[in-house]
Each structure stands twice: as C-alpha cells, then as structure tokens.
Image (cartoon, rainbow, N blue to C red):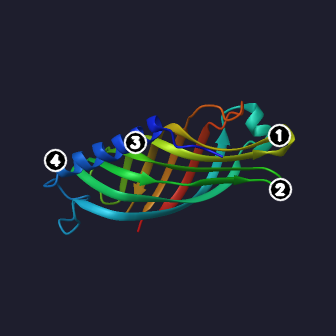
Amino acid sequence: MFTLTATRRNVLLALGAVTLGLMATHASAAPLTNNAATPAIRYFVVQPHAGIFIPTKAETRAVFGDARGTAGIAIDLVQQQLCPEHTISLRLDSTLLKTNDDHLYLVPIGVRYTKFLNNSDRVRPYVAAGASLCYVDLEVRQQGIDETKITFMPTFTAGVQIGQRGFVEATYLTTERIEGFDICGTKIAAGLSF
C-alpha cells in the first residue's frame, strides 16, 4: 500500500496552484494556433496514444524486453496558451507495460510546459518539460516485487504536432528506484488530440 504523505500532497497542490495561477495571469493570451477561432484556454484535451517503451537499464530490459509495446491516454485537464509558441497544462497521463507475469503501470499528474518551434499549421516541432507526482504499480514476480507508491517524476519530451490533431513524440521518464528496481526509460508514441 502507498501513503500520500504531507510533503507529496503539498507538492501536488503547489503544482496545481502554479498552473492555475499562470493560466489566470495569461487569460488574454493568443490562441493555440494561427486560427483565431481556437480558444486560448482549453479543458479536457484527450490524447490517446500507442507506441513503445525503451527501458534505460539492462535489468529492466531483462524483464520487459528491449522495447515493449505500450498504450495509454493523456488528458490535459486544463491547457493554457501563454503566447503563440508556449503552452502550459495540468496533465494526467498513463503508461502500461505488461508481460505474462509482470507489469508496470504509471499514472503521472502534474504540470507540463511546451515550447513550439514554429507557427506552421502543418508540422510543428516542439520540446516540453514536466514535473509530476506519479502513481506507480510495479510487479516483478521473479524478484519478489509487488509495490504501489506515489513518487516524483520529471519528464522531458521532444515531438512533432502534425496538423491540428496528430502528434509523434519521445518522452524520457525518470524517477527513483522502486524496491531497488529501475523504471526509468523513454516512451516513443504517436496519437491524436481531441
């Protein structure tokens, strides 16, 4: 079982407060794209995605493989345009890795800042950085690990937005070891935004 300590709870509340504060400060920001009809603030932007997860450490690859297929869904609960190239969002994501006997389930929630590198309506490369509290559910039977906990997880992303809905991105996820087991790695995924 995991416990949401006072420190972790305060970090999560601070992340939410910073996000909402920035959104309120920039309420008159430019729209998300060059289309003036697009609102500067959006709610519940849903992004189903699928791809592969590449573990950083050999011990993790020995359990889940060099590249394990994964699927998940990300939801920008609130997404604010700060200016045409910058957005900040309160983001909920999910990643699932599973073999016959073992699994790793990640559900981070936190703040993500995105910097677009151009204003094209067709292809927009971007970089992003995030800071989340992450719910981790890890089971590795051969090593006797069956653990759930909440931990801090920074993320670093590079990707391309394709048109108004499509995206392809690579995200590096890093956090502490869980029961001595390293769960860091890179998720490469493609998906759609709705």
Tell me the distance, in whole angstroms, between the alpha carbons under discs 1 and 2: 15 Å
The earlier-in-sequence mark between 1 and 4 is: 4
Tell me the distance, in whole angstroms, between the alpha carbons under discs 3 and 2: 34 Å
Tell me the distance, in whole angstroms, between the alpha carbons under discs 3 and 1: 36 Å
Q: Is residue 94 above or below residue 170?
A: below
The earlier-in-sequence mark between 3 and 2 is: 2
Q: Nearer the viewer, mark 1 or mark 4?
A: 1
> For the residue carrying disc 3, how many other residues have a C-alpha within 10 Å: few (<14), some (14-19), or many (20+)?
some
Q: Left of 191 or right of it: where is 67?
A: right
Using the rendered image of the protein, determine whether residue 105 is visible from the camera's viewpoint: yes
Closest to the observer, 102 or 144: 144
> For the residue carrying disc 2, how many other residues have a C-alpha within 10 Å: few (<14), some (14-19), or many (20+)?
few
Mark 2 highlights which residue?
Answer: 100
Numbered circle sitting on residue 128: 3
In the rendered view of the protein, which quadrant contains the C terminus?
Answer: bottom left
Q: Nearer the viewer, mark 3 or mark 4?
A: 4
Residue 22 image offset from top left, x and y in percent: 23, 45
The earlier-in-sequence mark between 1 and 2 is: 2
Dot 4 amino acid type: Thr
Q: Left of 106 or right of it: where is 122?
A: left
Q: Nearer the viewer, mark 3 or mark 2?
A: 2
Closest to the observer, 6 or 108: 6
Mark 4 highlights which residue?
Answer: 25
Mark 1 highlights which residue?
Answer: 144
Tell me the distance, in whole angstroms, between the alpha carbons under discs 4 and 2: 49 Å
